[in-house]
Amino acid sequence: MEALALVAPVQAAFESDAAAPRDEVALAARGDVRAFEALYRTHLPRVHSLVRRMRAGRDADELTQDVFVRVWQKLGTFRGDSSFTTWLHRLAVNVVIERFRTEQASRARLHDGEEIFNTLAGPALTRDVGLDFEAALEKLPDGAREIFVLHDVEGYKHHEIATLLEISAGTSKAQLHRARMMLRKHLT
Amino acid sequence: MTDPWIDRLSEYLDGELTPAERAALDTHLAGCRQCAMTLDELRAVAARAGALLPRAPESDLWPGIAQRIDAPPAVVPFSTRRRRFSFTMPQLVAAGLALMIMSGGGVWVLNHGGRATDMPKVAASPSAVLPISFADPHYDEAIADLQQTLQDGRSQLDPQTIRIIEANLAAIDQAIDQCRQALAADPANLYLHNHLAEARQRKLALLRRAAEMVNKG
């Protein structure tokens, strides 16, 4: 499914695509493995972080590899209408969502209980606030976490998320609020 | 009993309420300490999320990808490959970034309290060690404008949000400095160039997000 082709994620900060020179993309599209490896090296941290956060770490390495294999396969279809980074991100989100759909036919996880998160202790004492926050993020229910990552980390809008996840915009808003309410306990 | 307005606070934060709903919630916020505090916390959560830094995986995933795309093995002498992997500069940089995030931001917030750009340098001044130019007038101009917007609008953000933004900016600035210093020693290192570009883009993204929050009021 290519639902992501219909949406336009908000990643203005990366639209300049300074990290992906066009000649590198063009070379990779023509089958230059070295150029493709360079693209991989450039984009690996962001793609892996996106996958890891959406999946709470589950199969993050394997899915990241899936993303880049898919990129290699589809690079010839990249026409430059958007930045390469935006295109790559859409593709990565699609791969993650497809995995979720494979695992669970229904979107029932959007309604799972908060008891999972309640197993977390209060704010950690360490000053490593970034990693504490990431750890808290992993404890969110799958549905709330997906939406939180797409909206607050990656900058997608609710109507885009609704299209991607095949849910209503209202559900997206409710799950985002739920995730934020859970995470606020881990800010201090 | 839970205040029914609490469930609307994220929509308020994201500017998704109708003007009438927003006005009603504004009135409510003026008299409801619980909702006002919750709104600040939600704002801080969103700011924290927007400032998360990308992290590379612990292991290199390329061999598995290369195998799946049927890429020919790189023709590199064994001794060169060994040397490359024993050097592991990207890992060192990644470790440095992680260490800075773990310690630098927190220490700076606790001990300094000033602007992100006031952070002490890790080592010598970059200008003293840089053999190559990193000047980018457009980027620098954009950063300066956004920092000015943030400075001008500080009073519109809650102190916790400001603290988080500044701590993250400080960590990113330190990462940029370390990348530059490492590049001074190894100017042709592609990994370091990528790390530097990523850190600079991250700073731009964070400042844009902060400026957006200021503009939203």
Image: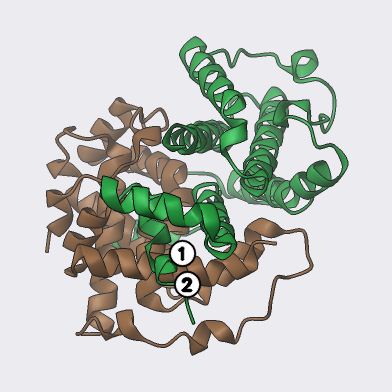
- Is residue B72 visible to us here? no
Callout 1: 10 Å neighbours few (<14), some, many (20+)? Answer: many
Q: Which residue is mark 2?
A: A56
Q: Compared to A110, does A14 lie above or below?
A: above
Quarter of the figure with the N terminus of chain A: bottom left
Quadrant occupied by the C terminus of chain A: bottom right
Are circles 2 and 1 on residues that touch, CB within 8 Å? Answer: yes
Q: Relative to A117, is A29 above or below?
A: above
* Residue drawn at (23%, 77%) of the image: A101
Crowd rating for badge 2 (residues with CA inside 10 Å; few <14, some 14–19, many 20+): many
Q: What is the x, y in percent for residue B80?
A: 61, 43
x then y, percent, for residue B58: 59, 61
**In the image, A20: left or right of B120?**
left
Q: Which chain is brown?
A: A
Q: Quadrant of residue B156?
A: top right
Residue B24 x, y percent position in the rendering: 36, 53
Please name the residue shown 67% across and 37% down the image: B175
Look at the image and give the colour of chain B: green
Hey, which quadrant is residue A12 in on the image?
top left
| Residue of label 1 | A53
Mark seen at residue B122: none
In three-dimensional space, the C-alpha distance between marks 2 and 1, rounded to whole angstroms, equals 5 Å
Instruction: Looking at the picture, tell me which residue is in the foreground, A95 or A134.
Output: A134
Check disc 2 and report its element: helix, strand or loop.
loop
Amino acid on which disc 1 is placed: Arg
Please give the name of the residue rendered at 13% of the width and 58% of the height, measured from the top-left corner: A3
